[in-house]
């Protein structure tokens, strides 16, 4: 009896010991599971904060691109500006970027730059650096005017392309514009603020700037290699005698003439009436007609301008392998140019300049019904009659920056 009792006690002790051991093991496993869950939860939160910090840094880059595109003078310089976003923060700043990749502060527009952005999510910080630069403003306009009020009378004008201005458009009637109207800068808009037709209108906060005729002449004929440079050089060194039939004498054209490219023609008297025209042979190269003297009162009365090879809608003289056959009339006078006659004109007009006090001038007007395959850039464009303008890319683009953006380099400065 005593032996049986002792055996039962041993079995009960064994069961109790097994129960205790099982409970200990189960508790250990449960504690481990809880610890693993907590660790995983903490790791998940840390991973989320790291990802969020990078998202905040990216947001800082985009914020700065938008800010400097609207006004580069308001760029955030080092040590940067801090902004709150979605429960986190980003700090962003700009530095100047040299051609060899070195950097310095402060950044001065319109130079190349680095944009830094540090994202901060619950104390987790990640910093990225992006190379950036300015990209040219939109320049594919059939007509662009600079600082004056341009008056367009009647509804018979047809523009196949976009138009834009830094100034004011005053329309009488509703000319046909197949593209859009872009107002650039705070002073641009409709006369009296009223859209005179069903035009699609875009607005840009900054003006679009172009080089003047004098600047373009100096760029093509710099004083260092073509003294005294620019229009003064062209007045004495041109292709008037060699590229024109009949030869142009005394920088004056009052009768029909044919100009063969490549050529730079300089005129101070252009007065074509009746059936007298300028014909352009651009098979072998571009034709530039420069009208001076700079700031002079003379008005150039132009007729014709039909080229042997007319630019087509897809014409892009800057495309790889393209043959440059541009025909451009550069007008440097205060009197401007009068587009007369009813001919087809395969040429663009560039009539924008500034005087010694920085005041803009350059007038294009018409007294006929021409069809123009090209572009018009002027300080002021006044149009009457049945004029048709078909946009063809021909003129030099803007000198101003349209926006600042990514330039082929993104790195994380402080990686995880």
Image (cartoon, helix red, strand yellow):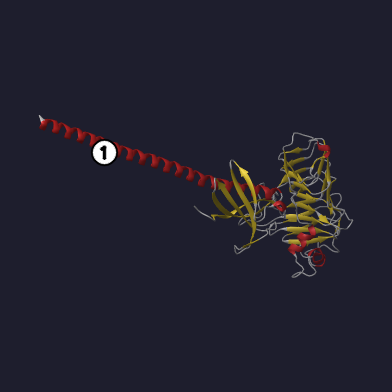
Q: Is residue 334 visible?
A: yes
**Residue 355 locus on image (x, y percent):** 85, 58
**Which residue is labeled 1 in the image?**
21
Classify mark 1: helix, strand or loop.
Answer: helix
Find the residue positioned furthest to the front: 2
Q: Give 416 or 335, whichever is nearer the viewer.
A: 416
> Residue 310 appears at what percent x and percent y?
70, 50
Instruction: Say left or right for 310 vs 50.
Output: right
**Farthest residue toward the right?**
297
Q: Could you say where residue 13 lies in the image, as x and y percent from the top left?
A: 20, 35
Q: Nearer the viewer, residue 58 or 331?
A: 58
Identify the image quadrant of the N terminus: top left
Image quadrant in which you'd find residue 353: bottom right
Which residue is painted at 75% across and 65% down in the image?
221
Q: Residue at x 30, y 39 (%)?
A: 24
Q: Is residue 339 at least partly visible in the picture? A: no
Where does residue 267 sit, x and y in percent of width and height? 83, 60
In the picture, measured across the screen, residue 15 lies left or right of residue 393, that is: left
């Amino acid at each position: 009896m005593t032996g049986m009792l002792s055996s039962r006690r041993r079995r009960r002790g064994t069961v109790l010991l097994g129960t205790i051991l099982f409970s200990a093991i189960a508790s250990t496993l449960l504690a481990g599971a809880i610890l693993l869950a907590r660790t995983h939860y903490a790791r998940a939160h840390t991973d989320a904060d790291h990802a969020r910090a990078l998202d905040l840094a990216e947001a800082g880059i985009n914020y700065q691109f938008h800010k400097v595109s609207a006004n580069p003078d308001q760029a955030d310089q080092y040590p940067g500006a801090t902004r709150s976003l979605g429960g986190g923060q980003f700090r962003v700043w700009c530095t100047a970027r040299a051609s060899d990749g070195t950097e310095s502060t402060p950044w001065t527009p319109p130079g190349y730059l680095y944009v830094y952005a540090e994202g901060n999510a619950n104390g987790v910080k990640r910093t990225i650096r992006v190379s950036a630069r300015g990209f040219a403003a939109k320049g594919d306009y059939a007509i662009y005017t600079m600082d004056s009020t341009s008056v367009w009378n009647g509804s018979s004008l047809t523009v196949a392309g976009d138009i834009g201005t830094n100034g004011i458009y005053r329309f009488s009637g509703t000319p046909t514009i197949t593209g859009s109207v872009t107002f650039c800068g705070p002073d641009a808009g409709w006369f009296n603020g009223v859209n005179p037709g069903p035009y699609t209108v875009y607005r840009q906060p900054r003006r679009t700037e172009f080089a003047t005729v004098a600047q373009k002449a100096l760029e093509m004929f710099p004083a260092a290699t073509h003294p005294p440079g620019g229009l003064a050089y062209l007045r004495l060194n041109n292709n008037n005698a060699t590229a024109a039939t009949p030869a142009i004498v005394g920088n004056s054209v009052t009768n029909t003439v044919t100009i063969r490219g490549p050529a730079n023609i300089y005129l101070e008297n252009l007065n074509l009436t009746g059936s007298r025209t300028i014909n352009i042979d651009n098979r072998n190269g571009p034709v530039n007609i420069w009208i001076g003297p700079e700031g002079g009162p003379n008005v150039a009365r132009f007729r014709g301008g039909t080229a042997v090879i007319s630019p087509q809608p897809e014409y892009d003289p800057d495309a790889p392998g393209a043959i440059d056959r541009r025909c451009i009339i550069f007008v440097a006078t205060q009197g401007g140019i009068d587009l007369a006659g009813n001919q087809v004109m395969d040429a663009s007009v560039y009539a924008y300049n500034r005087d010694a006090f920085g005041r803009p001038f350059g007038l294009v007007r018409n007294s006929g019904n021409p069809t123009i395959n090209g572009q018009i850039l002027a300080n002021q464009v006044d149009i009457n009659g049945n004029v048709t303008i078909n946009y063809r890319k021909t003129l030099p683009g803007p000198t101003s920056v349209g926006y600042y953006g990514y330039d082929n380099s993104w790195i994380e400065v402080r990686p995880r």
